[in-house]
Structure formats: C-alpha cells, structure tokens
Image: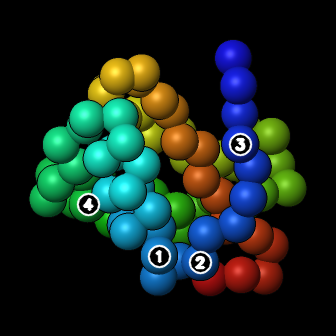
Amino acid sequence: MRSIEGWVSEGNVVRFLEHVSRYIGYDYGELDEVALIGALEPTDDESPDGWFDYPLAGTPPLTVSLAQAVGGA
C-alpha cells in the first residue's frame, strides 16, 4: 500500500477530493459533501485513532484519511 502525506486547508478539502476523484474516475458529488459535514470536527492529527477515513471507489479505489491539526480549524 502506498500513501501520500500533506496538508490541505479546510477551505480546500472539497476541491481536493473532487480533483482526486477525477483522477480515479469516481463521481464525487453532493452526497459525498453531506457525508463530510461535521466529520472532521472531532478529529485530531496527533492521535492514531483520531483520523476520519473516506473511501473513494474509483480505479484504483482509494481511502483518504483526514484530520484537523491540533489548534487548527
């Protein structure tokens, strides 16, 4: 399994997921955005169990793990 790490500002999470979805042929839409509402609020990037995993069922299928930075929005 490969992983890529980096930062995405809160205002660009949806745009990021839309772009990644296009690359793998996943039809990211309104239901995906609804699933993200409030999902990142209880997350913590310093806790191994504090991440929110979101699957994108394209080719290849991906799981995006997101968490807020401590003290971040």
- What secondary structure is marked by label 3? loop
Residue 14 appears anywhere in the view? yes
Instruction: Indicate the amino acid at tag 3.
Output: Ile
* Residue tagged 2: 9
Few, some or many residues within 10 Å of mark 2 (<14, 14–19, 20+)? few
- Residue occupied by mark 1: 12
x 47%, y 82%: residue? 11
x and y, in percent, of residue 73 in the image: 62, 82
**Location of the N terminus (image quadrant):** top right
Q: Which residue is mark 4?
A: 33
* Residue 72 locus on image (x, y percent): 71, 81
The reply, left or right, for residue 36 in relation to residue 26 is: right
45 in relation to 58, above or below: below
In the visual, does 20 lie left or right of 6?
left
Question: Cβ–Cβ below 8 Å for labels 3 and 1?
Answer: no
Q: Residues within 10 Å of mark 4 (few under 14, many from 20)?
A: few
Q: Residue furthest front?
A: 23
Name the residue beneath numbered marker 3. Answer: 4
